[in-house]
Image: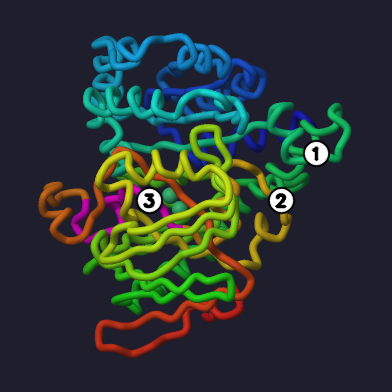
Amino acid sequence: MKDTLLKEYAKLIVRVGANVQKDQIVVLNAPVEAHAFTKLVIEEAYQAGAKKVIVSWNYGEDNKMYYQYASEETLKEFPEYNVKRLEYFMENKVAQISVGSPNPDLMKGIDPKKFVIASKAANEKVGFYRQYMMSNGSQWTIGIVPNLEWGKKVFPNVPYYEVIDKLWDVILEACRVREGEDVVENWAKHHKQLKDHREKLNKYNFKSLHFKNKLGTDLVVDLVEGHIWGGGSEVAQNGVSFSPNIPTEEIFTMPHSHGVNGKVVATMPLNYQGVLIKDFYFEFKDGKVVDYGAKEGKEVLKTLVELDEGSSRLGEVALISHNSPISNMGILFYNTLFDENASCHLALGNAYTMNIKDGYTLSEEELVKKGYNKSMTHVDFMFGSSDMEIVGTTQDGKKVKVFTKGNFAF
Ligand code: ZN
Ligand code: ZN
């Protein structure tokens, strides 16, 4: 892959994604496998004026062995120095950048129960940091880089020595990083388009959305009162605009945790805890999953649905036209960050406080009363299709076509 394009991608992550400010501390989580690209990100962050860049390296195989060999007692431990570290990040309002290089099969064979134990323990001690990030306390973003294992899975028919380059090609195209074009300009244009849709939906202020397609989805999702459609760029509580997901095509808002009824059938497999869940569906009653099934991976789906009370309710509903760059590539990335941007999706688990009026200032109790869903997880699954029809019902009962044949109707 050309250095100039990789530099543009690093620029996108630092300048548009995290929008690093002068004298801000940057916390950079990165896999050792991606050290060459991470170096470009570090350099770009300093050039953007970062006070210092704290790199936290991780190594997938090490992580796997921890889950493989550590006892349940050990998995329950969450050392105090890690709590202090996150407190320091919060106090200093750091910009957080995560570089990911996912291997979808990495955790194959590890008992999913072990992840639950570890994430429960972590949540007890540092749930505050998760809440802080979920409510955009300061800027955060995620960028993805290829690896061989992942590439072989996405392109099983391409010779192994070409898959990394091939994966770079599609990642950069999905992120609008193109030869001879300024990536920051491309994203300014893209953000404007997303803003147009967002503003229209905010103006309609729908009471509910009815999703229907031939596959069997027939679902009514009530939206919370005072919901706000977000997507594209966001403004963190420190006043800085940023773009949490790169790439991003979605417009999303907050469903009512007790107002979802009907059936939804997934249109793409879900990679959860390293296991692929295929051909699955959920049935909701008054917001709660009352039935579900999967052709493959139902056991793992069960650990998700039963993780806590909120993991059986929705925290996000997102709209994406079927005719969009990632969707048009027709590639299954086995990675939520990309796959979720190919299709309308829902998320089981925690909602985003940015998606409701006064979300940052209301207490959690008040938010929950309004229909905000609380959970230690947030897992997106895709259900958009080329024949998706969506009808919105306004507060005074008028019906408005939102999607027709898979795409926005306005
Ligand atoms: Zn989403
Ligand atoms: Zn989501």
Residue at the location (69% across, 43% down)?
Answer: 172
To which residue does mark 3 refer?
348
Residue at the location (55% across, 25% down)?
Answer: 107
Q: Is residue 309 left or right of residue 98?
A: left
Q: Check the picture and name the quadrant holding the N terminus.
A: top right
Task: Identify the amino acid type marked 2.
Answer: Ile
Q: Nearer the viewer, residue 24 or 378?
A: 378
Residue at the location (53% across, 42% down)?
Answer: 297
Residue 23 visible, this orientation? no
Callout 1 crowding tier (Cα within 10 Å): few <14, some 14–19, many ≥20? few
Q: Which mark is residue 331?
A: 2
Task: Give the mark toward the camera: 2 or 1.
Answer: 1
Horizontal and vertical percent position of residue 108: 58, 27
Task: Identify the amino acid type marked 3.
Answer: Leu
Distance from the alpha carbon under mark 2 to that under mark 1: 12 Å
**Image: magenta residue range:** 346-359
Horizontal and vertical percent position of residue 367: 16, 54
Q: From this viewpoint, which residue is outermost toward the right? A: 159
Tell me whether circle 3 and circle 2 mark residues in contact (CB < 8 Å). no
Task: Identify the amino acid type marked 1.
Answer: Pro
Tell me whether circle 2 and circle 1 mark residues in contact (CB < 8 Å). no
Residue at the location (45% across, 74% down)?
Answer: 218
To which residue does mark 1 refer?
156
Horizontal and vertical percent position of residue 192: 51, 63
Q: Respond yes or no on whether mark 1 lies under 8 Å from ligand 1.
A: no
Distance from the alpha carbon under mark 3 to that under mark 2: 24 Å
Badge 2 element:
loop
Q: Earlier in the sequence, mark 2 or mark 1?
A: 1
